[in-house]
Amino acid sequence: MAGAVLALAACGGGGDARPEEPTLPRGLAERLAQESEGIADQLEAGDQCGAAEQADVLEDAVEQAIADGDVPDAFQAELTATARKLQNDVNCPQPEPPPAPDCDALEEEKQSLEEEKQALEEQKEDADEDERAALDEQIKALDEEIKARDEEIKECKKGQGEG
């Protein structure tokens, strides 16, 4: 596919072209050819995402060249179609969605937090004033985590049709 853009781009600025034949300006033809080669190189190197970005750059360059009046009417449709097809064909794979939350695991985490909180409350009974203040802070933090876990469990169960 990149070769098609490259071939079209190569039509530009040739010294042997007859005056009545439309051509791409040499600089534009070379730039589009370089963009096309860059896409092919990135694909060959296994950089699908880099190639996709480069295909976007190429398509933008074609659109801009047409808007600037640098592409003769005879080439506009084919050059645009080729650049867009390349852009559509070369895409960066989407990351896999995160796994669905495991409601049972969330419940177990909450239970563990509650047990840890209970242990701190028992420890607090035998603690002096300074230790109690520190334990209160830890208990408060655990309460926040437990509340957050409750919300996650509600959302999890709602997502599974249980809530």
Image (cartoon, rainbow, N blue to C red):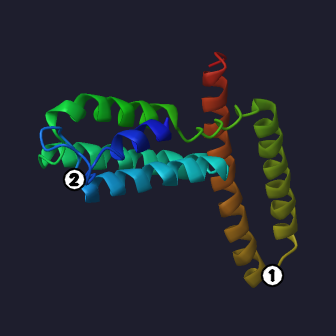
Q: Is residue 131 above or below residue 147?
A: below
Q: Does residue 136 appear left or right of residue 6 in this picture?
A: right
The image position of residue 24, as x and y in percent, is 23, 47
Q: Does residue 60 appear left or right of residue 85 in this picture?
A: left
Q: Is residue 39 above or below residue 85?
A: below
Quarter location, residue 78:
top left
Q: Amino acid at mark 2?
A: Pro
- Residue toward you, 89 or 2: 2
**Residue drawn 29% across and 34% down?**
80
Q: Does residue 128 appear left or right of residue 10 in this picture?
A: right
The image position of residue 152, as x and y in percent, is 64, 38
**Residue drawn 43% across and 56% down?**
34
Classify the position of the C terminus by image quarter. Answer: top right
**Numbered mark located on residue 25 in the image:** 2
User: Label 1 near label 2: C-beta < 8 Å?
Assistant: no
Quarter location, residue 73:
top left
**Residue drawn 81% across and 81% down?**
128
**Residue drawn 78% across and 80% down?**
131
Q: Is residue 43 above or below residue 80?
A: below
**Numbered mark located on residue 128 in the image:** 1
User: Which secondary structure lies at badge 2?
Assistant: loop
Q: Amino acid at mark 1?
A: Asp
Most extreme residue toward the top is: 161
User: Which secondary structure lies at badge 1?
Assistant: loop
The residue mark sitting in front, 2 or 1, is 2
